[in-house]
Image: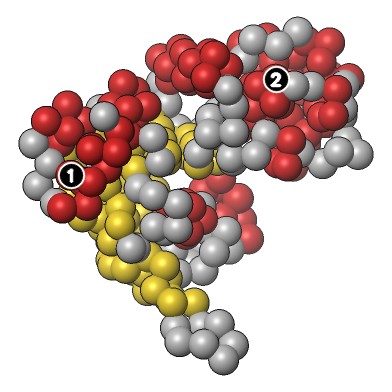
Amino acid sequence: METLLQVQDLTKIFYPAGRSPLTAVDHVSFSLAAGETLGLVGASGCGKSTLARLITRLTEPTCGTVQLCGQDITAARGRRLRLAYRQMQMVFQSPRGSFDPRRTVGNSVGESLTNFGVPKAARRERVAALLTQCGLPAAYADRYPHELSGGECQRAAIARALAIQPRLLICDEATSSLDTTVQQQIMALLETLKQTHRLSLLFISHDLALVQSFCDRVLVMHEGKIVEEGAPDALIAAPRSVYTQRLVEAAL
């Protein structure tokens, strides 16, 4: 099976002024196969979001490498980084916070299409189709983020992430701010879109039960390190690390 994402010894150390260095991500290595949904689970502050930002090049690593579709993107900039973003997009935790409140939803969803020179008419058609696929009326393209509910904003954010047809979608706590009913709807949408668009997903969450129900494989992160990995059911039934045991007990 094709390896879509390969992370090797990825590390991020922060150096706060007047304080001791903080290792947020500590020599993390893993791979993600094409078509796979890989869960990354751990408590708040364990380094999950920092790891996502390192993979997507929003934060510079201290050391280690990131390979996407066989290409080393660890130090990619300019055109090389734009090409990487054609293969990889991210959905953030805060639905409204990820949109510019001064721009319409349609302009935000179509931003990447604009950046890649897609003509206006084709762009509007593509945005309408994406909103519809994500369960929103095409007319929402003319609305502003504050006119949408949290769940609707997250649907629009997913539509925006899919605009340039990436192969990998990174969801960083993408459902944690939503109520249970809306959360289930978004998870069902992601599963449908995964099949329709042949996506691979890196699904980041603090919710072990959610990861178990959705992911093919799971990584457990604690204090910047991957402490355990495996199939969700097997890992939960017989956790090997003390930290994973605590997560399982807390989820029961």
Asked if residue 141 lies left or right of residue 45, the reply is right
Q: Please state which amino acid type lies under the numbered disc 1.
A: Gln
Q: Picture coordinates of residue 193 (x, y %)?
A: 49, 17
Q: Which residue, given by chain and number where applicable, does mark 1 sit on?
A: 245
- The first of marks 1 and 2 along the sequence is 2
Q: Is residue 243 above or below residue 183?
A: below
Q: Residue furthest bottom?
A: 18
| Residue carrying label 2 | 152
Residues packed near mark 2 inside 10 Å, few (<14), some (14 to 19) or many (20 plus): many
Q: Position of residue 130 (x, y in %)?
A: 66, 17
Q: Is residue 35 left or right of residue 87?
A: left
* Residue 249 % position (x, y): 23, 38
In percent of the image, x 42 and y 26: which residue is there?
A: 199
Q: Secondary structure at mark 1?
A: helix
Which residue is found at the position 14% from the left and 51% from the top? 241
- Identify the amino acid type marked 2: Glu
Q: How many marks?
A: 2
Q: Nearer the viewer, mark 1 or mark 2?
A: 1
Q: Residue 12, labelled with which disc? A: none
The location of residue 92, given as percent across then percent down, is 59, 41
Q: Eyeballing the image, is 157 above or below 126?
A: below
CA distance for labels 1 and 2: 36 Å
Quarter of the image where the N terminus is located? top left
Q: Residue at x 58, y 17 (%)?
A: 182
Quadrant of residue 215 within the rendered picture = top left
For residue 180, say whether it is visible.
yes
Q: Residue drawn 37% across and 27% down?
A: 210
Q: How is the image coloured?
A: secondary structure
Q: Is residue 184 above or below residue 169?
A: above
Q: Nearer the viewer, residue 73 or 236?
A: 236
Q: Looking at the image, is 202 positioned above or below residue 120?
A: below
